[in-house]
Amino acid sequence: MKARVHVSFKSGVLDPQGKAIGLTLGNLGFDGVGEVRQGKLIELELTETDTATAQKSVEAMCEKLLANTVIENYTIELDDN
Amino acid sequence: MKARVHVSFKSGVLDPQGKAIGLTLGNLGFDGVGEVRQGKLIELELTETDTATAQKSVEAMCEKLLANTVIENYTIELDDN
């Protein structure tokens, strides 16, 4: 099973990297770009085949390592194929 | 319109950050984790309302700034809401 974990800053947390991207896009001549946020996307190959168990396991990974839950949110997508 | 750009290393390109995550998950006791890859996810707010124009515009942003197309792939998702 494949898991995709998307980690992004909570709203209200300053995202300087996203801001820099937004400013640079403006400087390059791309108009009409509003807020830009940059997050991480972590793709994991899991040997687990049960979706519920995999979901729990990946949630534990997020809480322990993948996300800093003080300032970051995470979402998990599981792909059975 | 919202655009989500996912930038990840091409397969075959070494991903040390992903490797470090995989090793650390193993050290924390998470078994059954195979390959781990870390990519970036960039979320953009666009004022453009036409999907085709937005797609072209975001592709140009990827080629010029968001992705290093020598070693990275990108995928674009547009969300009309």
Image (cartoon, coloured by chain):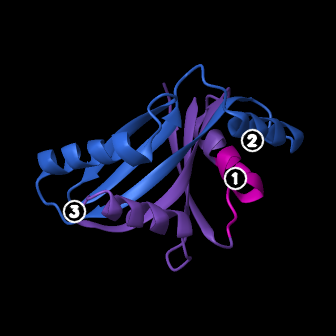
Chain colours: A blue, B purple
> Residue extending furthest top?
A12
Q: Chain of mark 3?
A: A
Q: Chain of mark 2?
A: A
Rendered position, B1 above or below B52: above
Residue at (28% x, 48% y) in the render: A58
Q: Position of residue A30 (x, y in %)?
A: 80, 39
Say which of marks 3 and 2 sits in front. Answer: 2
B47 falls in the magenta region:
no
Instruction: Say whether mark 2 and mark 3 are on the same chain.
Output: yes
Which residue lies under the disc numbered 1? Answer: B66
Taking the image as shown, residue A58 lies to the left or right of residue A75, namely: left
Q: CA distance from mark 3 to mark 1?
A: 29 Å
Mark 3 / mark 2, whichever is N-terminal: 2
* Mark linked to residue A21: 2
For the residue pair B8 and B47, the one nearer the viewer reads as: B8
Quadrant the N terminus of chain A occupies: bottom left
* Amino acid type of the residue that numbered disc 1 sits on in the rendered structure: Leu
Q: Chain of mark 1?
A: B
Assign a secondary structure to mark 2: helix
Which residue lies under the disc numbered 3? Answer: A81
* Amino acid type of the residue that numbered disc 3 sits on in the rendered structure: Asn
